[in-house]
Image (tube, rainbow, N blue to C red):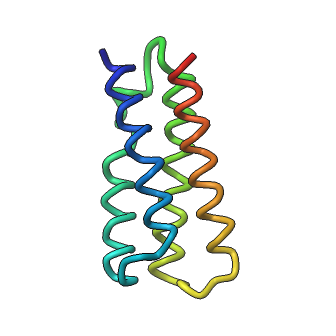
Amino acid sequence: MAAHTDLALAQKTLPALKQLRAGASTPAVQLASIKALADEIEVTATQLYGSQRAISDIRTSAWQAVCKVAVTLQDAPDDPQLSLHWARAIDATQAWIRALER
């Protein structure tokens, strides 16, 4: 059941990231939304143990990439690396989805 829930969350996260990256909302809304998304996909300590360890590691990578976008949006929204951070967050989320679909 946990893997199914994780897959649904990962599949929901990917289009949300893509929509936020498109920048259709104000910077403040974009920042609040990316922070909320990061909070939602954060891996808790209880998820780090057991047979799903590899998937938890991949999910953690996705979470870290999303957090990097949030920090950059907050501290340096004009940073030329922001586009790269978005791409890494999307790629890491896609890797999370692929791991869950195996």
- Residue 41 location, quadrant: top left
Residue 61 % position (x, y): 57, 44
Residue 69 % position (x, y): 52, 66
Location of the C terminus (image quadrant): top right
Does 11 sit left or right of 39 as displayed? right
Does 34 sit left or right of 90 as displayed? left
Residue 34 % position (x, y): 39, 64
Residue toward you, 13 or 77: 13
Work out which residue is located at the far bottom of the displayed protein and give it: 78
Q: Residue at x 31, y 71 (%)?
A: 32
Location of the N terminus (image quadrant): top left
Q: Residue at x 58, y 52 (%)?
A: 90
The vertical placement of 20 against 92, above or below, is below
Q: Residue at x 57, y 54 (%)?
A: 89
Does 22 sit left or right of 1 as displayed? right
Residue toward you, 76 or 24: 24
Residue toward you, 83 or 44: 83
Residue 23 % position (x, y): 46, 75
Does 67 sit left or right of 46 as displayed? right
- Marks counted in the figure total 0
